[in-house]
Image: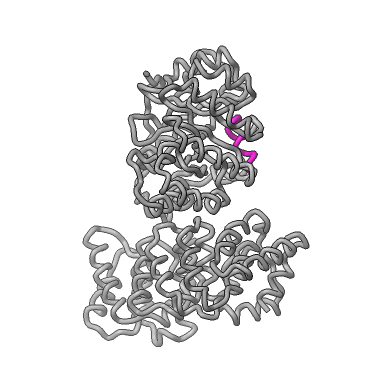
């Protein structure tokens, strides 16, 4: 079905190139053809953004929650098809080799597409590796508008991802299931982070405060109370929102933070 | 004025260099795969190096508003380690086919050994197969013969001179290279290759057709501002604006543009990046600001 949807968006020449190459991949168990063709997509498939109708989007959202939140070009989606068509028994070894030689855009597509794989859960160590990158586009591909981390990363790795997003100044509201995956351990690390920022005379992104929601821990409460007395407007309002917040998992509460995130980042 | 430095090894340079280059008007660079000053001992080191050319260094450059392209190849010095060279040759087609790879290079001769000859020829064939231009490194020692031999071999393989840049020319080689129809690049490199006063004289004598200025700045004493400094010196000494534009921008764009991977539109749309955007969310620059620096225009040699 994904294949059908994507092929519909290609020109006749693109479909021909793509289907020819896919046959080459099928007969090459070592994956050398796959790796080369994954790379060559940029020469033969345009990078135009895809436009979907409502029905298509409904299906894609089901396959890939938050699909419609990010932009997808035809190259990325053709690379997705190449990845999902790999035979499962070899896919881990081949995708690992692919990953080792990727350019920036190829890595971006790799991470965006991981969630499409039937055996997606087998690739969490590669996703953890990706979180360590300093290349913003690659980090964003894993962290933003991508359900992979929320579904498959351990709590430890998830916490690293959120911390790294904060340190890199990425928009937290785009992290899929940010509040659902939140945990007290992360809140306490952030508590230290906030005090570090304050000691250095720096402000804290208002988006960070939502991750202090819903814990009765005295240290966190104390920090929140201090923040309410802050002279920084954004910080004060964010801390007030946390203290007033009822249920961190309520939809309306999440919506408030998305709005704060949008205001802060745009 | 905008400049391209079509031969510079940014992996060896600092962020100060990137800042100064952008401030001086450099909008795009080409980083050829080369020898890192110390021989590599395993193919993994080559793979990581090629990865940095298509990945990390591109990102680093982008943070300073400079578009980064590269060429892929096995350099002549390391071609002499044949066991390793064989493994590197297996890697090349994959990297050479990637987006933003504008040529096969820098390849050619160093000591002019048999092994160098073998891998030079194999890489010429790879460039033909992928329809990519070729960047030829000419040797430091026995330069004139090495340059002529490189062109002879290219002709033997039926490569059109319009697809080849012969690099590191000097007064002794330039005439042959231009007469045979090749693009002639000059490396403004303090103390060894060329000083930029000599470069101005060459442009005055030979004009600007198929002549290219680059820095080849690397891990040695070299100057990442060689292109803009040479352009300023040309202006001071009465070279026309058009000739400066051709030798310090347009000729490089034309020859490497034949790869289909080197398009002015790539950087023209990005040059308008505001400083705020540049600083937002990056992890190399941390709240620093660009500092305007001034330098002497003359590079002695």
Residue B257 is one of the magenta-drawn residues: yes
| Of the pair A245 and B3, the residue shown nearer to us | B3
Which is more toward the observer, A212 or B37?
Answer: B37
Residue B112 drawn above or below residue A24: above
- Which quadrant: the C terminus of chain B? top left
How many numbered marks does the figure carry? 0
Q: Determine the residue located farthest toward the front in the rendered image.
A: B114
Q: Could you tell me which residue is drawn at 60 percent across and 79 percent down?
A: A61
User: Where is B22 relative to A120, above or below?
Assistant: above
Q: Is A229 contained in the magenta span?
A: no
Q: In this picture, is B40 found above or below A227?
A: above
Picture quarter containing residue A172?
bottom left
Q: Main secondary structure of the magenta part?
A: helix
Instruction: Residue at 30%, 64% (x, y): give it.
Output: A231
Residue displayed at 47% across by 32% down: B109
Against B46, is B196 above or below?
above
Q: Is residue A208 visible?
A: yes
Lateral position of residue A154 relative to residue A263, left or right: left
Residue A50 vs residue A134: left or right?
right
Identify the colour scheme used: one colour
Picture coordinates of residue B279 (x, y %)? 42, 51
Q: Is residue A233 visible?
A: no
Find residue B4 and report its horizontal and vertical position in percent.
52, 34
- The spot of residue B131 in percent (x, y) is 64, 43
Q: Residue at x 63, y 59 (%)?
A: A41
Q: Position of residue A187 (x, y in %)?
A: 30, 77
Quadrant occupied by the N terminus of chain B: top right
> Magenta residues?
B248-259
Q: In terms of image quadrants, where is residue B224?
A: top left
């Amino acid at each position: 079905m994904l294949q059908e949807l994507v092929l519909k968006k290609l020109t006749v020449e693109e479909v021909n190139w793509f289907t020819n190459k896919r046959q080459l991949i099928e007969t090459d168990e070592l994956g050398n053809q796959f790796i080369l063709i994954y790379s060559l997509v940029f020469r033969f498939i345009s990078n135009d953004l895809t436009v979907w109708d409502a029905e298509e989007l409904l299906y894609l959202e089901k396959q890939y929650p938050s699909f419609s939140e990010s932009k997808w070009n035809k190259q990325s989606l053709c690379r997705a098809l190449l990845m999902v068509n790999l035979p499962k028994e070899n896919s881990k070894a081949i995708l690992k080799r692919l990953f080792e030689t990727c350019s920036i855009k190829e890595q971006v597509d790799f991470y965006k597409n991981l969630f499409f794989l039937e055996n997606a859960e087998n690739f969490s160590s590669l996703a953890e590796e990706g979180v360590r990158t300093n290349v913003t586009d690659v980090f964003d591909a894993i962290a933003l508008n991508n359900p992979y981390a929320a579904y498959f990363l351990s709590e430890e790795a998830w916490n690293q991802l959120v911390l790294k997003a904060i340190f890199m100044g990425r928009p937290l509201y785009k992290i899929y299931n940010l509040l659902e995956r939140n945990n007290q351990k992360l809140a306490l690390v952030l508590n230290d982070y906030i005090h570090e920022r304050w000691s250095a005379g720096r402000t804290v992104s208002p988006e960070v405060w939502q991750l202090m929601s819903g814990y009765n821990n005295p240290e966190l409460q104390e920090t929140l109370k201090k923040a309410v007395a802050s002279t920084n407007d954004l910080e004060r309002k964010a801390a007030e929102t946390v203290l007033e917040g009822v249920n961190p998992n309520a939809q309306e509460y999440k919506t408030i933070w998305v709005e704060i995130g949008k205001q802060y980042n745009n | 004025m905008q400049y391209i430095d079509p031969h510079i090894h940014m992996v060896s340079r600092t962020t100060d260099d990137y800042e100064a280059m952008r401030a001086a008007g450099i909008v795009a660079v080409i980083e050829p795969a080369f020898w890192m000053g110390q021989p590599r001992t395993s193919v993994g080191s080559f793979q990581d190096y090629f990865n940095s050319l298509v990945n990390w260094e591109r990102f680093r450059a982008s943070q300073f508003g400079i578009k980064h392209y590269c060429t892929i190849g096995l350099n002549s010095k390391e071609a002499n380690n044949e066991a390793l060279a064989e493994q590197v040759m297996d890697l090349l087609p994959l990297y050479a086919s990637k987006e933003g790879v504008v040529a096969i290079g820098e390849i050619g001769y160093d000591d002019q050994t048999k092994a160098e000859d073998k891998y030079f020829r194999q890489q010429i064939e790879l460039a033909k197969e992928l329809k990519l231009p070729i960047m030829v490194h000419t040797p430091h020692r026995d330069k004139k013969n090495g340059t002529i031999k490189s062109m002879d071999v290219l002709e033997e393989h039926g490569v059109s001179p319009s697809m080849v840049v012969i690099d590191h020319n000097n007064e002794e080689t330039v005439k042959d290279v231009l007469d045979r129809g090749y693009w002639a690049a000059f490396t403004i490199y303090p103390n060894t290759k060329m000083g930029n006063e000599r470069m101005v004289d060459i442009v005055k004598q030979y004009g600007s057709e198929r002549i290219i200025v680059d820095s080849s700045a690397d891990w040695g004493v070299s100057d990442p501002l060689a292109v803009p400094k040479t352009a300023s010196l040309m202006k001071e000494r009465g070279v026309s604006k058009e000739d400066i534009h051709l030798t310090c921008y347009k000729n490089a764009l034309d020859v490497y543009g034949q790869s289909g991977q080197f398009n002015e539109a790539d950087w023209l749309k990005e040059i308008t990046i505001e400083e705020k955007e540049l600083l937002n969310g990056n992890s190399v620059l941390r709240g620093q600001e660009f500092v305007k620096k001034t330098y002497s225009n003359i590079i002695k040699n």
